[in-house]
Image (tube, rainbow, N blue to C red):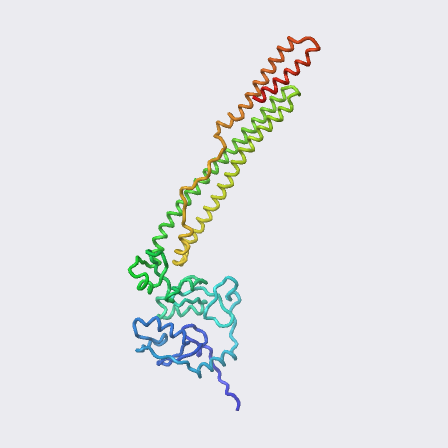
Amino acid sequence: MAEASISVDHDQFSCSVCLDLLKNPVAIPCGHSYCMVCINGCWDQEDERGVYSCPQCRETFTPRPVLRRNNMLAEVVEKLKKTEVRAASPAHCYAGAGDVECDFCTGRKLKAIKSCLVCLASYCETHLQPHYQSPVFKKHKLVKASKQLQEKICSQHDKLIEIYCRTDQQFICYLCTMEEHKGHDTVSAKTERTQKQVQLKDIQKKFWQRIQEKQKKLQEVEQTVETLKLSAQSAVEDSERIFTELIRSIEKKRSEVTELIRDQEKTELSAAEELLEQLEQEITDLKRRNTELEQLSHTEDHIHFLQRFQSVSVFSGGEDSPSITVHHHHHHHLSFDGVRKSLSDLKERLEEFCRKEISRVSAQGKRGFFLIEILIAIDFYLKT
């Protein structure tokens, strides 16, 4: 016998809760059909009242009706799935790498835009509509689509974690407050978040003050380095001028003095540059942590906020960079002026010595002794 052909509309076999084709369809006493998971989820929310209603016609039932799978309807839906060519959604709506997928899409998943903390599921724009339209979902909490929904479930009671135990410093569900956390100091995650938010502002202020202090110190060290360079350069130039005025026989000593000054400059600069690098690293770290705090302050997820808060809010206000060995400004000249003074004294004494010796020594045979005397005097003064 030829199989009868019936034209059916996709919407006739769609669940009004998830807006998708029925899965394990069940019919409730008023005649409307739903996915078994969807209607049970709705009625679980009404357990406390003990009165159960139809999400479409709002007819109420007491006690809770017993649900059984409608096999005939399930077969029709399966045939519809095989024969129906569903229109593809725009490519940009499909979930890609890093996106949160819609838990209710069949086949290729669309990108979820919201997650429900009550349903513990994520929804694309289409499947999210019942949360906006149906009174059943009126009290559900929607947040930005998140992959970490399971982290918000109590592993012991499979309930939403929405309470913070201050006594044990743990995140718990409402059933935990009746058992192992009974009598403890507990508040809602939102209340604890509000208090921590105030602390976060204070910590951010301290971080900013610390950054400013480091920047000021950085400028001071940079100025010290510049002064050190100018002072060292001035000392080198003076030593070059003085040695140029001396006779060629002290060229070797002049090079030694120049090298001495350069060594001192290198030592001082090395210490200063090491501190500069440390200061810049500390500033970078403080700015990074301040940025984390700023991002954390804007998150809508209270639990994520509290979980991250303790690790990123640690602030060591008393830390200080090691003191630099570079001397103060007025000491720069003293360190190099010692060289200048020794050289100037040497020049004057040598000139005076030469004048006396030239007037005293006239014989050709004594000139060798005269040169030896000068070299001995130069060596002595440079060493002292």
Quadrant for the C terminus, please: top right
Q: Is residue 156 above or below residue 256?
A: below
Q: Nearer the viewer, residue 26 or 19?
A: 26
Q: Is residue 32 above or below residue 266?
A: below
Q: Is residue 200 above or below residue 113?
A: above
Seen at 44% across and 67% down, the residue is 123
* Count of marks, rendered view: 0
Q: Position of residue 3 (x, y in %)?
A: 51, 88
- Give residue 212's quadrant in the image: top left
> In this image, 6 relative to 307: left or right?
right
Q: Nearer the viewer, residue 291 or 376?
A: 376
Q: Position of residue 292 (x, y in %)?
A: 44, 51
Residue positioned most to the bottom: 1
- Give residue 367's quadrant in the image: top right
Q: Position of residue 11 (x, y in %)?
A: 45, 77
Residue positioned most to the left: 183
